[in-house]
Image (cartoon, coloured by chain):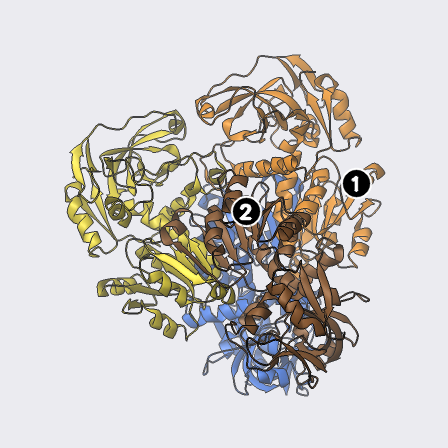
Chain colours: A yellow, B brown, C blue, D orange
Amino acid sequence: MKAGRLFEYNAPVRVVDMPEPKIEGPMDVIVKVGGAGVCGTDLNIQKGLAKDSPKLPYTLGHENAGWIEEVGSVAAMSGLRKGDPVILHPFTSCGLCRACRGGNDMHCVNGHFPGLDIDGGYAQFMKSSVRSVIKLADGTDPVPLAPYADAGITSYHAVKKVIPLLYPGSTAVVIGIGGLGHFAIQMLKVLTSTSVIGIARSNAKVEFAKKLGADAAFPAGNDGGLKQVRDFTNGAGADVVLDFVADKETPDTGVKMIKKGGAYCIIGEGGIVSDTTIDMIVRELTLMGSLVGTYNELNELMELNRMGRIKITSKVYPMSDVVQVMKDLKDGKVLGRSVLDPWK
Amino acid sequence: MKAGRLFEYNAPVRVVDMPEPKIEGPMDVIVKVGGAGVCGTDLNIQKGLAKDSPKLPYTLGHENAGWIEEVGSVAAMSGLRKGDPVILHPFTSCGLCRACRGGNDMHCVNGHFPGLDIDGGYAQFMKSSVRSVIKLADGTDPVPLAPYADAGITSYHAVKKVIPLLYPGSTAVVIGIGGLGHFAIQMLKVLTSTSVIGIARSNAKVEFAKKLGADAAFPAGNDGGLKQVRDFTNGAGADVVLDFVADKETPDTGVKMIKKGGAYCIIGEGGIVSDTTIDMIVRELTLMGSLVGTYNELNELMELNRMGRIKITSKVYPMSDVVQVMKDLKDGKVLGRSVLDPWK
Amino acid sequence: MKAGRLFEYNAPVRVVDMPEPKIEGPMDVIVKVGGAGVCGTDLNIQKGLAKDSPKLPYTLGHENAGWIEEVGSVAAMSGLRKGDPVILHPFTSCGLCRACRGGNDMHCVNGHFPGLDIDGGYAQFMKSSVRSVIKLADGTDPVPLAPYADAGITSYHAVKKVIPLLYPGSTAVVIGIGGLGHFAIQMLKVLTSTSVIGIARSNAKVEFAKKLGADAAFPAGNDGGLKQVRDFTNGAGADVVLDFVADKETPDTGVKMIKKGGAYCIIGEGGIVSDTTIDMIVRELTLMGSLVGTYNELNELMELNRMGRIKITSKVYPMSDVVQVMKDLKDGKVLGRSVLDPWK
Amino acid sequence: MKAGRLFEYNAPVRVVDMPEPKIEGPMDVIVKVGGAGVCGTDLNIQKGLAKDSPKLPYTLGHENAGWIEEVGSVAAMSGLRKGDPVILHPFTSCGLCRACRGGNDMHCVNGHFPGLDIDGGYAQFMKSSVRSVIKLADGTDPVPLAPYADAGITSYHAVKKVIPLLYPGSTAVVIGIGGLGHFAIQMLKVLTSTSVIGIARSNAKVEFAKKLGADAAFPAGNDGGLKQVRDFTNGAGADVVLDFVADKETPDTGVKMIKKGGAYCIIGEGGIVSDTTIDMIVRELTLMGSLVGTYNELNELMELNRMGRIKITSKVYPMSDVVQVMKDLKDGKVLGRSVLDPWK
């Protein structure tokens, strides 16, 4: 089969031929990949910046959707059949550890993250687990939906963490209107009555934020949007900041944007978050990291998509365009998310 | 009346004569102070390190208990009478802002913090508010109980914030076994079934932690106790770290001690907390500041004291010893808390 | 002043002249009533069915809005001025009991409920408390907004109680599309992504439910809508039932509509709720009563109104129409809520 | 193998020979039963009162502990080995439905409840699932611990549901000091600082409640203990009532015992719970059914046992005594729980 693989760090992904994956255990599922989202994390992996860089060569792609191809014995009992359209939770959790038992799949101590630590979905077929499969309604085209599998669920998990802090009259800031942020703005509007401010580098993304429903959107400018947030909130600051960039200066700015009792939620990566302990106490702040989400959260999100309450902005490219697609992402040119189709 | 006042920064408190406070509004309460706890924050104020240093001269003391002396009209309707033994919530909240209405007195936007921003309890009489008064059972001696008013409630608020993360089989670390930490260890044992590790600088305080019920206690040593926590938890790390020091290197160590999904709670002050955003995400950590607590929390705490489930270690000194008592605190010589009696 | 008063049970309200209320304590507020909502509870009081029937004669009206006329000393300090447009939380809470301190104004042990236990708002002036006043934006016409003060806040409190049970893919049933239910449907759509089913007696109200945003609406019919709810949920039952009728057979039907782990929330009155303990266990059901709401909840609700996310359907009548307006309500002819204007 | 089976309703259990269960799927586990607790539910099943009475003959016993005998392929991967001492979660959940994914194993839509709907643990061997197995520390004697598997976990689940309502100064009532209630009293004392009142029919159980740590214990008497609860709480009523009887008149009494805003939690079975909707609203009551608990809860409970914070009172009998043991339970003669050992 064709697969887009990384052979060395700081070099482009190459589309090559490789053997198809096989069913090895009763939980295994082979999926014919329809679409694989291209994520900023893929760029970081390519640069060798991932926390535990995988052994090369391996296949990128942790945001995948497609159709069931073959199933193991437990997977078969669950009713999955060849041809079913599916989207995949990015983590193949074990189902038996304390985290899995409590619904926190993403903290599973025995699982894998295809596309990060084993072969992923920049390929015509990939191996996943019955625990990761969400069946879509018959006839659904899974290809453009792939980004829900990671960009979507990661936003949704972060938004759900901060919902208890958001009430009518409150304000939430979304820093970074990329693949994740474009979901977060919609989710905040659909699931809460907070006022939403979007902040982005480019004017195109500032406009995109408004189109997605942000009550206001500002260019990051020199101060990362701090003054604009203060003005919008009459000097009080925001109740919640969701930082999908979290690189360089955004954590500093983000912490300054929050009001007394508020929370700064980190979803992006690359920077350092810091504050004096006296400020943490006096303003009683909370700084929280947020990882992908749970299986049930992805299920809920696909329901929001089905109901039309959340809409995805994605564009599908043939896998042969992988190098250009990754470059566009790096250059900040993508609105929403790009998806690779390995069959084109 | 006699009062212990600060006339210039970096100089000792002086006990002087000054006029007694008067009832000015219907919510006002004049309390005859029986005991005023001596807190590390008093040392910071003396050094001019408080966030908004008060205008000098003024009277220290934000941890106060005594007897009702005189009440305003609203306070009178609430049933308070001269001679009632009382302990005072440290904040004189307004009762009308959103924070007060939601039970978060400590975030009140209109209140005062006697001993921090207006005259406090190192004095024979002080002015407080009907909203701050908790009546103790008739005949209770309020003097040795004063430290519940700040050290107690601050510990209790922090412990209650982390309780949802603590289950039988979990581990909580208490860094700093001073006035606050000596309460926190007991609270964790009484309100949860977590295993508690105490960490302190001096051997006396390590032993004190064990006596208070810690399952284990270690000297901070060169690595702040990190290795001991890792060993105790078989390498996994603690579910929760409560840092009552939060100065210099403890925040760094504290963040390292936590396991995936865990929380580092800051109650001490003076240092800087920081972490990479990638670590915040991958371990899905939460860093939380914690301020004093609510009025209801102080009420619950006094009930725990009455039931004998939490016990205070405090020693009462005449106000004339104020300089020595503050020096002993600075030198780490106090077990539990010292209390000044302005009538001796 | 003119006031609509009840002189004997089971007799019509009479509009009479009576003395104006006076400021007596520092928390008191005199409000010039602009509008007083007419509620089903007023019909029950008239029939002598209230739990603790008030001593007659007295003035009905517990759903009030208008303008500040005069204020006591504490109220004055809070910035209220004559002429400010306001809406009134229906309970005059004390602010000092455990319930008030925890934000649960409606459980205050010292307060009054004007219009239920003391003179209410079917009058040109009424006495309330600074703790009950919510200032509206300058220039707001408070008259048609009065129903938010009770119908609105009561719905909002109930909806907030069940929100934790509602996720995308879940179903909530609203029984009774009257003054309260017409708010509940909108709130469920704005604050959650559940599917909402409305159930009403009359076709006009079934259509009203759909217009308000219900995903489906059915006439109660012979079985109270049970079959329709089961069909809509493919036999599973609803996650949540909010019963704004709770009279005669609706509690029986309501409990049958819920699925395993679900909740039946009671806001109406007059009937009996019952279930076998074995069914309560095996389906792990929760039955919950819901009382008005908190001051902060009313504040949030007025923000939802200001943002245009919740809209009120109300019609204003001169106080002289009180008898007819109460009759129309009894006959189920009111869409949304009727409001009496005591100055017309 | 030997097994205690029910051949007809309203007839005694008979100990007979039958074939041993076999591994059929990859999740299956065969356990050599060491002890099977005898529960009031067994008496109800015998009387044909279970909701969905199982097809006869079948083997009773849903509260089981013992040693691993044989494992399926997935179970093998999880590290279980022949001879490991284990206790079994009573439900063999699927791990794939929304309830399992969210940690609510007991609401699994695909599982079985051995001893209720398929053959249980009154037998030398039984079939369970890898999802139900909790491994105990090497060398642990599982036999006397069996009652944790159902009586323990059911109490623990109920106690955890009401913990958010319990604060220092609150009161909780435990009705019924049998197998479940004897755990509940200890759990309330270990996990909260509420005052605990025990209520039982016999004087032996009233004394037992005190020995277990109840702050007070009363005989049910003519009024079910209502007056005693009111006196203990100065007329206010209890914050929480946990009813482990829930038969005949206890639900009526239980609802009357609760204070404003309180909760009545049903764990026993046989009666009817009912209240007027007006009382449900005015006192804002919550009535909640409580089913067994989750796998993680059983794990936490075994940790509480290991730490010695919860202690079991159980007595082990040879299986041949099954008829007498069930009669003793029916006659209210058992303190704590009786366990059958099928190998004796």
- Which of the 4 image quarters holds residue A22? top left
Of residues D3 and B109, which is closer to you in this image? B109
**From the viewer's perspective, is B107 left or right of D283?**
left
**From the viewer's perspective, is D35 left or right of A282?**
right
Q: Position of residue A103 (x, y in %)?
A: 47, 42
Of residues D42 and C144, which is closer to you in this image? D42
Task: Identify whether D281 is placed above or below D294.
Answer: below
Give the number of the disc on residue C262. Answer: 2
**Disc 2 secondary structure class:** strand
Determine the CA span between mark 2 and mark 1: 37 Å
Count the marks. Answer: 2
Residue for point 22% across, 27% down: A19
- Which of the 4 image quarters holds residue C193? bottom left
Q: Quadrant of the C terminus of chain D?
A: top right
Q: Position of residue D221 (x, y in %)?
A: 84, 44
Determine if residue C217 is in view: no
Q: Is the Cβ of the residue at disc 2 closer than 8 Å to that at disc 1? A: no
Residue carrying label 1: D211
Residue for point 68% across, 59% down: B301
Task: Identify whether D242 is placed above or below C32.
Answer: above
Of residues D103 and A281, which is closer to you in this image? A281
Q: Chain of mark 1?
A: D
